[in-house]
Image (cartoon, coloured by chain):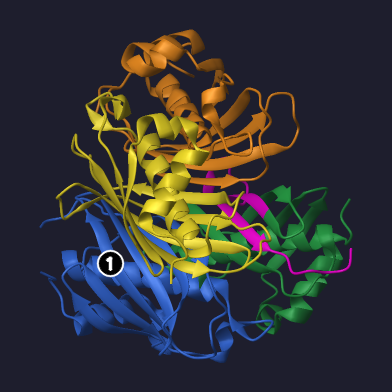
Chain colours: A yellow, B blue, C orange, D green
Amino acid sequence: MPKMTAQEVEDFIFSHFPTANQKRHFLVEKLEEMRAQVRMIYHQRQLRPGGTISGPALMALADTAMWVVLTGMIGPVAHTVTTSLNINFLRKPDKKDVIAEVRLLKLGKRLAVGDVVMYSDGEAQPVAQASVTYSIPPHRE
Amino acid sequence: MPKMTAQEVEDFIFSHFPTANQKRHFLVEKLEEMRAQVRMIYHQRQLRPGGTISGPALMALADTAMWVVLTGMIGPVAHTVTTSLNINFLRKPDKKDVIAEVRLLKLGKRLAVGDVVMYSDGEAQPVAQASVTYSIPPHRE
Amino acid sequence: MPKMTAQEVEDFIFSHFPTANQKRHFLVEKLEEMRAQVRMIYHQRQLRPGGTISGPALMALADTAMWVVLTGMIGPVAHTVTTSLNINFLRKPDKKDVIAEVRLLKLGKRLAVGDVVMYSDGEAQPVAQASVTYSIPPHRE
Amino acid sequence: MPKMTAQEVEDFIFSHFPTANQKRHFLVEKLEEMRAQVRMIYHQRQLRPGGTISGPALMALADTAMWVVLTGMIGPVAHTVTTSLNINFLRKPDKKDVIAEVRLLKLGKRLAVGDVVMYSDGEAQPVAQASVTYSIPPHRE
């Protein structure tokens, strides 16, 4: 069972990432046992030439979605860090919000691994898939 | 819709990969629209020290499962080749068959990308997750 | 031999990526046969909690460095796109510029693959390593 | 400085991996500070249709090369395990030995990350590139 609600994790993002705070561009839409859904609000700033959402914006979304589900499951542990991220870009995203669905495949004491699939809002075909590994520092359970 | 049945793809493996043929250690259990399930029969030869199924055996399973779903969807096109593979090892597999569930996330004209999750037979927690990209040569549809 | 100079590629970034243009935070320091060096200017905006440069900032650097060496080698071809990126975070970066050294391992007609190693300015131990694949659209040579 | 010689690591492979032992198909050619070179002896068994060395054979080589440099650096610690592997296949390998050059990018207490570039014997262009992460169990230094 998650130790935090979606709203609590979202507030934790914004209290700890002041830049993100100003923008409020990641919303935690769902937080369940080992799963979460995170929305990245569309903003023109994310565009790259050709009018598509940039790779780095999708990578930031994948990383954030993984952080959300991990933080939701273990609580507000400080200093979890990404150790690796692998992303495949599948289709050109539309100029709209992107939804990330993340599933924790492993939640160990020291390492957590998640699989993230990203969709343009309302579309059935994914725009990108990522697997993300986080390192978890020693903490009180 | 797949262009081949599970049995046809399995036979195609064994006619083209004579080494695998001798062993019959990959079975195509399901082949559906953009999805497949492949079983790797347990054999002591796959073990590494510590008694666990080796990483290379799981990598071969991921690669084969992706090849199965791709071949099932596009038919017996020769010379599709793996261009990249990313695998995360999650848990020590049991000494038994490993089941790979693969989903094609993208099936383009030139590139296909699949997500593979592997389980020890009968277990709920995955032992490994892989994403695999194949290059598809020009062919008649 | 590269078809563009370091300065030409840098100007091409800024003419095509207006956001980056305002910031001028990527500098092309070297451009040689199949290799380049790109500097990401340190800015507080890149920080994440704990005072370290964020993962997404390093991913953007890896992606940009690969784009630089590719564009340098093939000229100003429009619509090259990242198809996959794998990054390993190795050490906490210092609060200073990060230098990316990229080597093109493959430059095919349709796909290019590069290996990127990133260092905090002046340090010997890398902070991250990435491999990046780009798709190249049909173009006049 | 490495804690073992190339010959000691090679013997350690063969004492621990009885299958590999029968075949002696991996040779440790160099072992230096944070670097190693491993040769995979060509054998028809590694072929896949089209006459090229199979992806799984190259993945096994990348994994072995990383294990060699890690074991060389930390000594014969039991139960180091691969946690992730990312490989890009760049060119069709020739029907001959493949040489892996591996560089340890990080050697931490719990995790080690290496970059492996593989060449057909005598060729200048790489056939594959891999990055490999190993988990290191607690051990006496």
- Looking at the rendering, the stretch of residues picked out in magenta corresponds to D113-141
Q: Residue at x 69, y 30 (%)?
A: C94
Query: Where is residue D19 drawn, in percent x and y?
Result: 65, 82
Chain letter, disc 1 residue: B
Is C21 rendered above or below residue D45? Answer: above
Q: Which of these two is toward me, D7 or A53?
A: A53
Query: Where is residue D83 drawn, in percent x and y?
Result: 59, 64
Q: In the image, D25: left or right of C112? A: right
Query: Total number of numbered labels?
Result: 1
Query: Where is residue A102 drawn, in percent x and y?
Result: 36, 59
Residue A134 picture quarter: bottom right
Residue B19 seen anywhere in this rendered image of the structure = no
**Residue D132 included in the magenta stretch of the image:** yes
Q: In the image, B78: left or right of D7? A: left
Q: Which of these two is toward me, A29 or D60?
A: A29
Q: In the image, A141: left or right of A120? A: right
Circle 1: element type: strand
Q: Main secondary structure of the magenta part?
A: strand
Check disc 1 and give the amino acid type: Arg
Q: Quadrant of the C terminus of chain D?
A: bottom right
Query: Where is residue A107 drawn, in percent x and y?
Result: 52, 68
**Residue A77 included in the magenta stretch of the image:** no
Q: In the image, B82: left or right of A79? A: left
Q: Which of these two is toward me, B57 or A113?
A: A113
Q: Which residue is mark 1?
A: B103
